[in-house]
Amino acid sequence: MSITSITPELEKINPAAADFLPLLGTDYIEFYVGNAKQAAHYYKTAFGFQSLAYAGLETGVKDRTSYVLVQDKIRLVLTTPMTKDDPINDHLRTHGDGVRVIALWVDDARKAWEETTQRGAISYMEPTVEKDADGEVVKSGIKLYGDTVHIFVERKNYHGTFLPGYKPWKSAYNPPTTGLKYVDHMVANVGWNQMNKWVEFYEKVMGFANLLSFDDKDISTEYSALMSKVMSNGNGRIKFPINEPAEGKKRSQIEEYLDFYNGEGVQHIAVATDDIVKTVRDLMSRGVEFLKVPSSYYEGLLERTGPIDEDLAPLAELGILVDVDDEGYLLQLFSKPVEDRPTLFYEIIQRKGAKSFGKGNFKALFEAIEREQESRGTL
């Protein structure tokens, strides 16, 4: 899992955050998809994930099929329903392919469920013990925005490949990885005037603190705007920015997402790399498409950022953005949506000390997204 250390500011704001709900990291992210076999092939081919585990008819699971992929500390689960009446079909009809489960690695899943439900969370899964020959896993869960859920996973007494009910997935086809390391953060899009509701949820129910806030003056263009607040748990390993639309002349990317996803959900997943130039080159060579900013973005870049230990030529060639804060700088690039609906996309990020989220790039990024919206006729 991510091993980002706690910031002194967060510790000061929320000293009790790690006391009642210590989170060890992101355990896995589960997508509901129309065809898990094909989606798994895409994530292996395009993003360099590796085969890890499988559950389906051959393992005694009759209602769904799941493929588990891994790259360093990132685990993705791709799940497809096997019968026409399975409730997963409702999720697919409404949202298309998308994130259903954000699973959090905990030391005590029973306590995590008790603490969060006592503070007002709606239960999704009461504490449940799953066993096989490799030990046992305790899982519990709570409901979030839209149809998204958190599942708490306690695996200290389990030594299998992934979870009980899964078998190792052996495949002769495992393209090389692309250097993705861990989940840096995951961003939620919520409806009009819903951001503060979910900020309060993470504060009161899960003990998170509001690390950063951005309003429509920070994130806007001539045409559209959004509001965002970044929530972080006590040890800083889990970060969830939460976006809502703001008034603008035209329809923002958040409104477009909400319309096509038919509700609130995960907008993008930011994954970390130690060498963004190499990672992005590799991803592009495999067919992953990225947003592009005008070449004028790089004119006077060092005057805006100050000295950075980077060669600007490959950054400009690939469209990689740079931003700074008091602790360093970061490099980031955003993919185009990876579904036919303009919903989920990925951020590739490399941190060189910075703990921020690219505030200086918001305008350039928004304008790049608006150009895509205009080509889709949805601006």
Image: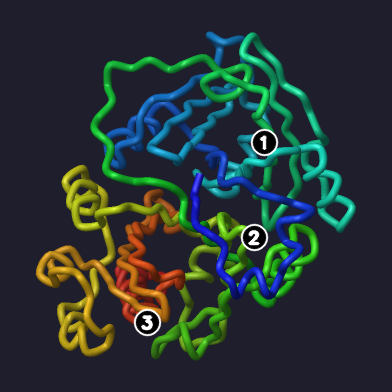
Location of mark 2 (residue)? 233
Residue 373 appears in the figure: yes
Residue 263 appears in the figure: no
Residue at the location (85% across, 50% down)? 117
Q: Distance of mark 2 from mark 1, alpha carbons? A: 16 Å
Residue at the location (43% across, 56% down)? 270
Location of mark 1 (residue)? 153
Residue type at mark 3 is Gly
Q: Which numbered disc flags the more N-terminal residue, 3 or 1?
A: 1
Residue type at mark 1 is Val
Q: Which mark is residue 360?
A: 3
- Judge depth for marks 3 and 2 and give the one in front: 2
Q: Position of residue 229 (x, y in %)?
A: 59, 74
Q: Position of residue 12 (x, y in %)?
A: 67, 74
Q: Which numbered disc flags the more N-terminal residue, 2 or 1?
A: 1
Image quadrant assignment for residue 208: bottom right
Image quadrant assignment for residue 69: top left
**256 relative to 348, above or below:** below
Residue at the location (60% across, 75% down)? 9
Q: Residues within 10 Å of mark 1 (few under 14, many from 20)?
A: many
Residue 183 versus residue 288: which sits nearer the camera? 183
